[in-house]
Image: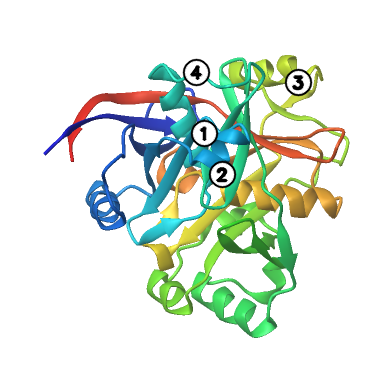
Amino acid sequence: MPQRPFNQVDVFTDTPYLGNPLAVVLDGTGLDSDDMQHFARWTNLSETTFVLPPSDEARAQGADYRVRIFTPGGELPFAGHPTLGSCHAWLQAGGVPQAHTHIVQECAKGLVTLRRDGSQLAFAAPPLQRSQPDPALVGQVAAALGLEAQHILASQLLDNGPVWLGLQINSLEVLLALQPDHQRLKALGQKVGLVHVDPGHTATTLVARSNREARAFGQRSGTVGHPVDAPGLTVRAFAAPIGVPEDPVTGSLNASLAQWLIAEGVAPTRYIATQGTCLGRHGQVFISQDNTGQVWVGGDSVTCIAGFVHL
């Protein structure tokens, strides 16, 4: 079996083993979909990616590499932490982007632009389609989660490649105490993202934490915020239908939550979301909306394992 360069990267953290791990096969040439799915099932991580040369059409549009993204249960058209982690691994392995100002990734969803901001990478959130979910679905999901109707402030179906049922929860304590029935969620076939917004933050507030990572973000963004003791948003993601009961830190979900909640005036245009607390992680997702309305989703990545895989 060929020996292929391989990294395992921790994403949305600058401290190893506190974020969301990602397996990256840096040369996926010659592997078919079954090979990739088999290996992703074996790694048993929320996602495993395979880096490939871009298609000719995508290269002509500026793409630097192509990535295929697999969960243990299937292939995804796009996902956030695999986008950041794959780009981190590609750059660290010597990848040189066509443009000096940004990197362009090809995936099944299309082309995704990334930019470097100090130690962080950030991706441009793909266009979002959102709609009101069927109340019956919301009721069934709430029952599987152990939520009462009064705990849900708002709900949306969010589609930026992956489809999430987004639920805004009125209590941080309730959110963190949830112990879902994952078998019921799997039977419903619906991934669910839950978010609590700290009511102390307004739409013009930069949410920052009083630590080195948050201060660095504030300096890079050119906006000095007022450090607080808690993040602006707290997120949990349940994805039993694709073989991931709870995802530690989820870029695609945070992207769609940001586009939804910023548009509704519920969240500020710059904030930090935390995710993974209930799994013993401390993922931090840096959200910002630029002057054109584009939402950027950023975070640090660190390489924990570097070597080769026989595949």
Dots 4, 3 in contact, CB < 8 A: no
Dots 2, 1 in contact, CB < 8 A: yes
For numbered disc 1, what is the local secondary structure?
Answer: helix
- Which numbered dot is residue 262? none
* Placement of the C terminus among the 4 image quadrants: top left
- Which numbered dot is residue 84? 1
Q: Residues within 10 Å of mark 4 (few under 14, many from 20)?
A: few
Name the residue tied to disc 4.
96
User: What residue is rendered at 44% in x and 38% in y?
Assistant: 281
- Residue 228 image offset from top left, x and y in percent: 72, 28
Q: Residues within 10 Å of mark 3 (few under 14, many from 20)?
A: few
In this rendering, would 245 be left or right of 132? Answer: left
Amino acid at pointer 4: Val
Give the spatial CA distance, label 4 vs label 1. 16 Å
User: What residue is rendered at 45% in x and 20% in y?
Assistant: 95
Name the residue tied to disc 3.
221
Q: Nearer the viewer, mark 4 or mark 1?
A: 4
231 or 122: which is nearer to us?
Answer: 122
Name the residue tied to disc 2.
251
Q: Residues within 10 Å of mark 1 (few under 14, many from 20)?
A: many
Give the spatial CA distance, label 2 vs label 4. 24 Å
Identity of the residue furthest to the bottom in this view = 136
- Residue 68 image offset from top left, x and y in percent: 42, 46
Amino acid at pointer 1: Leu
In this rendering, would 46 be left or right of 308? Answer: right
User: What residue is rendered at 70% in x and 68% in y?
Assistant: 152
For numbered disc 2, what is the local secondary structure?
Answer: helix
Q: Earlier in the sequence, mark 4 or mark 3?
A: 4
For numbered disc 4, what is the local secondary structure?
Answer: loop
Amino acid at pointer 3: Ser
Residue 115 in which image quadrant = top right
